Amino acid sequence: MMELNEIIKKLEETLSPRRFNHSLEVMKSSIRLAEKYGEDVEKAALAGLVHDCAKNLDKDAILAACKKYGIIVDEISERWPKLLHGQIGAHVAEDLFGIECPRILAAIADHTMGKPGMDRLSSIVFVADYIEESRDFDEIDIIRAAAEESLERAIVAGLDSTIRHILKKGRMLHPQTIATRNWALRQLNEMKQQEGQ
C-alpha cells in the first residue's frame, strides 16, 4: 500500500481544493467516531481520507469506470452518475493506492447511499461524511447531535435530511437510500427493545 503522506499528496493533486479539504475533515471526523465507538482508528482514518477519491470524475469518466469495473448502472444512477463515485472510489483506492482491506474498500463504496447491514467502519465513514467540520446546512446540528447518541441515529437523521432535500428538488430517490434508512431504523428499534427488557 502507498504511504499515507503519498496518498495525501496524490489526493491534493487530483481533487479540487474544496474536496481535498472535505476529505481531510472526514478523516478527522472518522477518527473521532472510531475512538467513540470502538473501531480501528487507522482503518477509519484511511477510509475517511480516501472516500471521495473518485468524486471529481465527470459523467463520461464515471460511466467508463463502471464499465471497466463491472459496476451495474441502474436508471437513477444513469441520471445522476455521481451516486456511483463511492463504488468507483473503492476500485480506485485499490488500484491507485494499493488499499486491499475489504472493510476499508466497503466503507468507501458504501459512503454515498449507505448499505443495509453495513458494518461499524462503513457506518462511521458514512456519518463522518455528513458531520465533518466544514459542513453547513440546515439540519447539520441535528445530525451531529444524533452522532453523539449512536451511529444508527445519525444515519437515520442524515438520510432523513437527504431524502427531504431530494424530494424538495423533485428528484427520484434511490432505493438503496431508502433501504439503508429502513435498516438503520430497524437497528434503532431493536436497540430500544433490548433497553426496555
Image: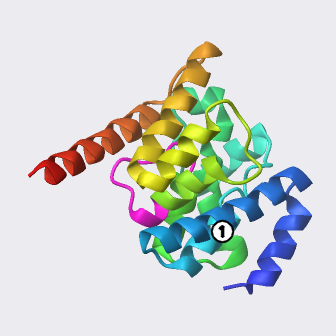
Left or right placement of residue 164 versus residue 197 in this view: right
Residue 180 appears at what percent x and percent y? 40, 41
The answer to which image quadrant residue 51 occupies is bottom right
Tag 1 secondary structure: helix
**Which quadrant does the N terminus fall into?**
bottom right
The answer to which image quadrant residue 93 occupies is bottom right
- Main SS of residues in magenta: loop
The residue most toward the left is 197
Residue 170 appears at what percent x and percent y? 61, 12
Q: Which residue is mark 1?
A: 93
In this view, the residue in front, 123 or 78, is 123
Label 1 crowd (10 A; few <14 / some 14-19 / many >=20): many
How many numbered badges does the structure rendering display? 1
In this view, the residue in front, 186 or 145, is 145
In the image, which residues are magenta?
A: 111-122
Left or right placement of residue 6 versus residue 50 in this view: right
Residue 117 appears at what percent x and percent y? 33, 53
Task: Name the residue located 63 percent from the left edge and 62 percent from the top edge.
Answer: 29
Q: Is residue 139 above or below residue 131?
A: above
Q: The residue under label 1 is which amino acid type? A: Ala
Q: Is residue 158 above or below residue 109?
A: above
Task: Name the residue located 80 percent from the left edge and 49 percent from the top edge.
Answer: 56
